Image (cartoon, rainbow, N blue to C red):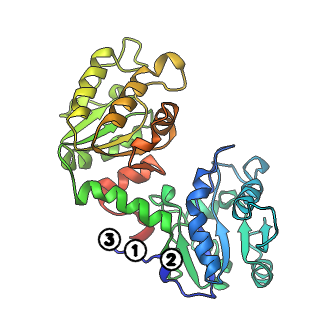
């Protein structure tokens, strides 16, 4: 892998920056990851068009507008409250002339939720055509969606492509698992999303142990992985599962974990996830976990500092481990 860093991008140019803007209320950690990349672009005197998405809207829906995310980002870039950075929010992304003129007078032009238009998820080649015509480079710092062939992710095929500081850092940390594995390597899969299982065959090839919890044991047939028996109600690991998983985790040299071990939203079904979280955090192994409920369990225990990487997305992480690359740079 040899991704071009944003550090090598020409100064004084117009840049499209794809960020991870799908933030939850009160949690701007995804925005924080891209602050260094934005500051570097501004130091290079670049004019920056920021694009991204939020949620899964059905057409234009004010509930999913990125206007509030724009305001949060600018307050993070200007913590003193002084108007040091000229910026503007534009909701009509098809108005090339408006965006073009905005780039003349603003350092940052922030565009509305791309998923308001069908062309984003269908990767319509005409979608964002106007934006391509008035900019010179593309920077991807949205690794959480780098496994999706959406239009904003594939822009590197139309503009010279570079990658943000957070993007490259996360890719390098994830690929350590396959490029420099510490044995035994243990992969833990949980949660309710069945699509994790499509990576199972490839993960078995790179891992010494694959532990299956969450809802997945009810979806999987006979296999040579360690599948949890679960409690009688099927909503969490059994005590036997917990002890079995903890023993394997304690002997591991590397651990990759994606997905809660039980129905984490229910307090009486959190035991398995929290027990596994403690075991993973206490292990001296190199540890990567995906966010969501998995990350929440570690955070609730105050053990985030024990983890080498909180990956931005489980689907992205598993695809990168299974295939060694992502659609974002194929």
Instruction: Provide residue 285's location: percent of width, then percent of height.
Output: 27, 43
Q: Secondary structure at mark 2?
A: helix
Q: Give the CA separation, mark 3 to mark 2.
A: 15 Å
Q: Nearer the viewer, residue 63 or 194?
A: 63
Q: Are marks 3 and 1 in contact (CB under 8 Å)?
A: yes
Q: Give the CA separation, mark 3 to mark 1.
A: 6 Å
Q: Which residue is mark 2?
A: 6
Quarter that holds the N terminus: bottom left
> In this image, 238 relative to 180: left or right?
right
- Can residue 216 be seen here? no
Q: Residue at x 72, y 50 (%)?
A: 64
Q: Which residue is mark 1?
A: 3
> In this image, 189 relative to 21: left or right?
left
Q: Residue at x 79, y 70 (%)?
A: 88
Q: Which residue is mark 3?
A: 1
> In this image, 48 relative to 298: left or right?
right
Instruction: Provide residue 46's location: percent of width, then percent of height.
Output: 64, 82
């Amino acid at each position: 892998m040899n991704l071009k860093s944003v550090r090598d991008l020409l100064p004084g140019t117009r840049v499209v920056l794809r960020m991870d803007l799908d933030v939850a209320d009160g949690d701007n950690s995804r925005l924080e990851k891209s602050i260094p990349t934005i500051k570097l672009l501004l130091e290079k005197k670049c004019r920056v068009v920021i694009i991204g998405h939020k949620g899964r809207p059905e057409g234009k829906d004010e509930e999913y507008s990125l206007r509030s995310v724009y305001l949060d980002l600018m307050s993070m870039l200007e913590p003193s409250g002084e108007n040091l950075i000229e910026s503007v929010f534009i909701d009509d992304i098809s108005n090339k002339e408006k965006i073009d003129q905005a780039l003349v007078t603003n350092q940052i032009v922030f565009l509305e939720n791309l998923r308001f238009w069908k062309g984003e998820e269908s990767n319509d080649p005409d979608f964002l055509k106007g934006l391509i015509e008035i900019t010179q480079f593309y920077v991807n710092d949205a690794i959480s969606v780098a496994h999706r062939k959406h239009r904003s992710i594939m822009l590197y095929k139309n503009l010279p492509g570079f990658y943000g500081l957070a993007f490259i850092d996360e890719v390098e940390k994830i690929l350590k698992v396959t490029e420099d594995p510490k044995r035994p390597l243990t992969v833990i899969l949980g949660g309710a999303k069945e699509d994790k299982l499509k990576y199972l065959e490839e993960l078995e090839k790179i891992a010494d142990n694959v532990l299956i919890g969450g809802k997945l044991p009810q979806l999987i047939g006979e296999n040579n992985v360690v599948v949890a028996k679960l409690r009688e109600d099927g909503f969490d690991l059994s005590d036997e599962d917990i002890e079995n998983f903890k023993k394997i985790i304690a002997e591991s040299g590397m651990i990759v974990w994606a997905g809660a071990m039980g129905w984490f939203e229910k307090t009486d079904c959190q035991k398995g996830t929290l027990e596994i979280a403690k075991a993973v955090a206490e292990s001296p192994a190199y540890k990567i976990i995906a966010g969501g409920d998995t990350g929440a369990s570690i955070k609730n225990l105050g053990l985030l500092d024990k983890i080498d990487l909180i990956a931005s997305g489980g689907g992205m992480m598993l695809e990168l481990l299974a295939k060694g690359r992502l659609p974002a740079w194929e």
